[in-house]
Image (cartoon, grey):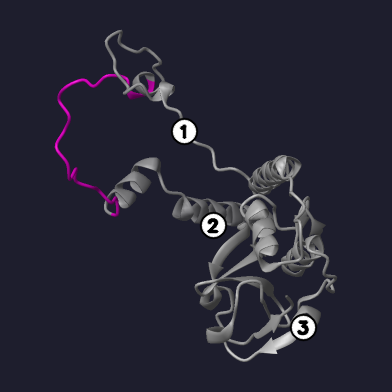
Amino acid sequence: MKFKKSMYSIATLLALISTVMISPTALASAGSAQVVTSVRSFAKIKSNRANTSDESASTKVENNSNWGGIESLNVPQTPSAAEIEAASRAAERESLSNRTSSSTSNSASVTVTPPNDASVASLLDVISQVVGKVPYKYGGNTLAGWDCSGFVQYVYNQVGVSLPHNSGGQARAGVAVESLAQAQPGDIIANGSHASIYVGNGMVAHASSPSTGTLYSSVSYSFASGNYSIRRIL
């Protein structure tokens, strides 16, 4: 009885195994129905191509090749901020050195012949000897350089008249003259910021600025605001 049951169990197991086992041919047949195929969408290349990898890596250059001579170009370089500042300072130092040398040379060659008397003619003669020769120097009152009131002080000192070294004080010296129409050569024309000496014909002599030095110019130019005093000393 047990033998029959064993045989039955073995037969049943073999039947199950044969049911689940599938031959390779069956799998291939079943799968072949689901295979996805593609169609070429571009023309087939019939000619052989060169090895593009070799071409891209090639370093061979033909002897007659002309690349425009780029190796000889002189490309300007933009200077840095530090280089620009250094160049600016160098130019400023050179300009200052030139002005100083020029001023020293001019002042060294300037000589003034002392006047014989304290007259307007002597005053104007002193002015003629220094105009265009003495540089402007803030705070100065000598032939080495002077500012506007220093110039007036120096010129009047040559004829024996002592004046303060400031334009405001010079604008209150002497006797007042009412208008430019009544001004005479030798009169001081000044205000709180500038001083000059009238030489006639609407002109004054004065130390104008560092760039122009001592020169003649019109009253309207020297005192554009029209605000000034006219003072008679001699």
Dot 1: within a 10 Å radius of its alpha carbon, few (fewer than 14), some, or many (20 or more) residues?
few
The residue singled out by tag 1 in the image is 75
Q: For the N terminus, which image quadrant?
A: bottom right
Q: Is residue 229 shown to the viewer in this render? A: yes
Which circle marks residue 174 in the picture?
A: 3
- Measured Cα–Cα span from mark 3 to mark 1: 69 Å
Q: Which residues are magenta?
A: 34-53
Q: Is 186 above or below relative to 51?
A: below
Q: Nearer the viewer, mark 3 or mark 1?
A: 3
Taking 149 as reference, is 224 left or right? left
The residue singled out by tag 2 in the image is 12
- Measured Cα–Cα span from mark 2 to mark 3: 150 Å
Question: Helix, strand, or loop for circle 2?
Answer: helix
Question: Helix, strand, or loop for circle 1?
Answer: loop
For the stretch drawn in magenta, the main secondary structure is loop
Of residues 173 and 213, the one drawn nearer to the viewer in this rendering: 173
Q: In the rendered structure, are the residues bearing label 2 and label 3 in contact, judged by CB atoms less than 8 Å apart?
A: no
Looking at marks 3 and 1 on the same chain, the residue that comes earlier in the sequence is marked by 1
Q: For the C terminus, which image quadrant?
A: bottom right
Residue at the top extreme of this rendering: 63
Question: Helix, strand, or loop for circle 3?
Answer: loop
Q: In the rendered structure, are the residues bearing label 3 and label 1 in contact, judged by CB atoms less than 8 Å apart?
A: no
Q: Nearer the viewer, mark 2 or mark 3?
A: 3
Q: Is residue 3 shown to the viewer in this render? A: no
Which circle marks residue 146 in the picture?
A: none
Of residues 180 and 113, the one drawn nearer to the viewer in this rendering: 113
Amino acid type of disc 2? Thr
